Image (cartoon, rainbow, N blue to C red):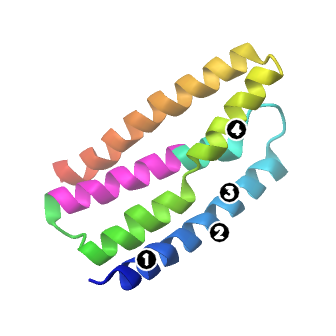
Amino acid sequence: MDLIKAMLIAGSGGFIGTCCRFLVGKICSNYIHGVFPWGTFTVNLVGSFIIGVLFGMAERHQLISAHMNLLLITGFCGGFTTFSSLSHDMLTLLQTRQWMIFVLYAALTFIGGLLLVWAGRGIIIRN
């Protein structure tokens, strides 16, 4: 696969993932109010689960081709999850001295993300 084709496939997935991330953020901000960054939190945990499922499908059933890996894992999940936004949210919480929310957000995001990657892979690999 040539580099341009690979970039276009990954970029297409990234575009879709970014649009989905935007929509989740808007939905969360419209329905949930407060200091806790629910939009970023939600996409990072959902994205962790999705990438776990996709890697599980690749490992267990060999259902993910190189093209699908670029589209779904590199592209979609890369565009959907938001580590840079997570980092910004965490810095903002620190700067505004929201210590407990910072600790809660960091712990829930990292532990929750790890558990959901594990769960996503487990669902696919065990079946």
* Residue 63 % position (x, y): 21, 70
> Which of pointers 2 and 4 lies earlier in the amino acid sequence?
2
Q: Is the magenta stretch mostly helix, strand or loop?
A: helix
86 vs 37, nearest the viewer: 86
Q: Quadrant of residue 33?
A: top right
Q: Which mark is residue 96?
A: none
Q: Which mark is residue 7?
A: 1
From the viewer's perspective, tell me whether residue 97 is left or right of residue 113: right
Q: Which of marks 1 and 3 is in front?
A: 1
Q: How far apart are marks 2 and 1 (CA)?
A: 18 Å
Residue type, numbered disc 2: Cys
Q: Is mark 2 on a helix, strand or loop?
A: helix
Q: Nearer the viewer, mark 2 or mark 3?
A: 2
Mark 2 lies on residue? 19
Q: Does the magenta stretch include residue 76?
A: no
Q: Nearer the viewer, mark 2 or mark 1?
A: 1
Q: How far apart are marks 1 and 4 (CA)?
A: 27 Å
Q: For the residue carrying disc 2, how many other residues have a C-alpha within 10 Å: few (<14), some (14-19), or many (20+)?
A: some
Q: In which quarter of the image is residue 56?
A: bottom left
Mark 3 lies on residue? 24
Q: In which quarter of the image is residue 105?
A: top right
From the viewer's perspective, tell me whether residue 122 is left or right of residue 120: left
Q: What element carries label 4?
A: helix
Residue found at x 78% / y 18%: 98
Residue found at x 83% / y 52%: 30
> Which of pointers 1 and 4 lies earlier in the amino acid sequence?
1
> Which of pointers 1 and 3 lies earlier in the amino acid sequence?
1
> Which of pointers 2 and 3 lies earlier in the amino acid sequence?
2
The quadrant of the picture occupied by the C terminus is bottom left
Q: For the residue carrying disc 1, how many other residues have a C-alpha within 10 Å: few (<14), some (14-19), or many (20+)?
A: some
Q: Give the range drawn in magenta.
A: 45-59
Mark 4 lies on residue? 88
